[in-house]
Image (cartoon, grey):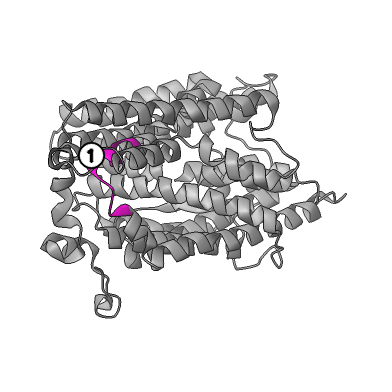
Amino acid sequence: MLGTTVIIPTALVPQMGGGNEEKAKVIQTLLFVAGLNTLLQTWFGTRLPVVIGGSYTFVAPTISIILSGRWNDPDPVSRFKKIMRATQGALIVASTIQIVLGFSGLWRNVTRFLSPLSVVPLVAMAGFGLYEFGFPGVAKCVEIGLPQLVILILFSQYLAHIIRPGKNIFDRFAVIFSVVIVWIYAHLLTVGGAYNGKPPKTQISCRTDRSGLISAAPWISVPYPFQWGAPSFDAGEAFAMMMAAFVALVESTGGFIAVSRYASATPLPPSILSRGVGWQGIAILLSGLFGTGNGSSVSIENAGLLALTRVGSRRVVQISAAFMLFFSVLGKFGAVFASIPAPIVAALYCLFFAYVGSAGISFLQFCNLNSFRTKFILGFSIFLGLSVPQYFNEYTAINAFGPVHTTGRWFNDIINVPFSSEAFVAGILAYFLDNTMHKKDGQIRKDRGKHWWDKFRSFKTDTRSEEFYSLPFNLNKYFPSV
């Protein structure tokens, strides 16, 4: 999760007008809010070992706020704070969509119609759809990114089965071992002058000494609500951010399902999934109150980390969240981790996102792959899930604006953001086709794999669901799941 915690502020804060001090503070705030939201989700949400962190989905509407032209202030720090307050206001309003859909039970009614067939494209694209953050990021500094990828695979997939098999040392700690080794190697290249005189892009991607970031970070600083000032509200920006929140809701549904798969939990009952969505809405609200500059959703990389380490323990994630809260108060800590070159993080993504994608593919075992209906829904939804966002992203890269380009940036985002998400396009399309094509045929129900999930449609029909998803402190008595 340190990837999104560092990469998103590093990309957004300079555009907002902030310097190293503001960047360090935003990283610190994002880490603090992530720890707080993870504790809330694991205690009162789905109760799965899921991490709630920053999301790339909210970047586009945030950039629209930056480029809106309403914040032409000669003082860059003042401009940064005004843009941050506008982003806070949009996030606070946007959080209502997930809070309402989750806690009202509306999302429960939607997810009741999910089947293993419609889940395959949703979960698979939640992982595979993030391919642009994988090897393209590694290639930005291939002499660092490629060794990280090779060493990570060597430790997790080979040495774990050669040296003292059964001890689970290399597969559990492969990420730590490999990152430390390559980080030291990258630092030696930096201090050895390997990047002196290189182009600025190379230096940004490869160097470990982020100039001024560590010195600008405070030793101890506790993030607090409205630390940038009172939020400002704009209807258009709020609507655009609400659409991003809805897209994040669909993507997070796939993330929750992937985590339940790797945590060896029973399939998520719709009421539990809806409860988790409600608390994710609270997470976006807290992001707006504290001023992270970004919304919150299920951390897809941490879902992949569960698979890599084979540790699906809720307690481990809660302890990790407590460490996030502790270290976020130490500003220097966040600044030090910001010195990790981005290609190292991209190499980790190559494995993490691959594991999440494969979790989606694993649901094919419940479907009848000899059915042409199954083949059509799978092939068509996955193909368009890749093709449609590719068109939108390619158009944006060439023209600096999306296919929908009007004078209202907020309206552009409402259309462009959802169609730029692979998981959203594939998931919505598969859901629609699966629930409209010849649904009443009894054989079709078996082809969809729906009968495998009948036992888990309700919270109380399987005792294992109560073991995994019951609220602590006997709260199920007052907030029963159905």
Coordinates of residue 6 in the picture (x, y in percent): 55, 44
Coordinates of residue 258 in the picture (x, y in percent): 29, 44
Please count the marks in the image: 1
Three-letter code for the amino acid on which mark 1 is drawn = Ile
State the residue at coordinates (65%, 48%).
23
- Above or below, 460 against 54 in this view is below
State the residue at coordinates (54%, 54%).
30
Check residue 472 for magenta coloring: no
Q: Is residue 110 left or right of residue 18?
A: left
The reply to whether residue 38 is visible in this rendering is yes
- Above or below, 151 against 15 in this view is above
Task: Report the residue marked by disc 1.
Answer: 169
- In front of the other: 24 or 429: 429
Coordinates of residue 45 in the picture (x, y in percent): 35, 64
Q: Which residues are magenta?
A: 111-121
- In front of the other: 248 or 323: 248
- Above or below, 4 against 164 in this view is below
Rate crowding at label 1 as few (under 14), some (14 to 19) or many (20 or more) other CA atoms within 10 Å: some
The reply to whether residue 218 is visible in this rendering is no
Helix, strand or loop for disc 1: helix
Return the residue found at the far bottom.
478
Check residue 117 for magenta coloring: yes
What predominant SS class does the magenta segment belong to? helix
Q: Is residue 401 left or right of residue 429?
A: right
State the residue at coordinates (29%, 80%).
478
| Quadrant, the C terminus | bottom left
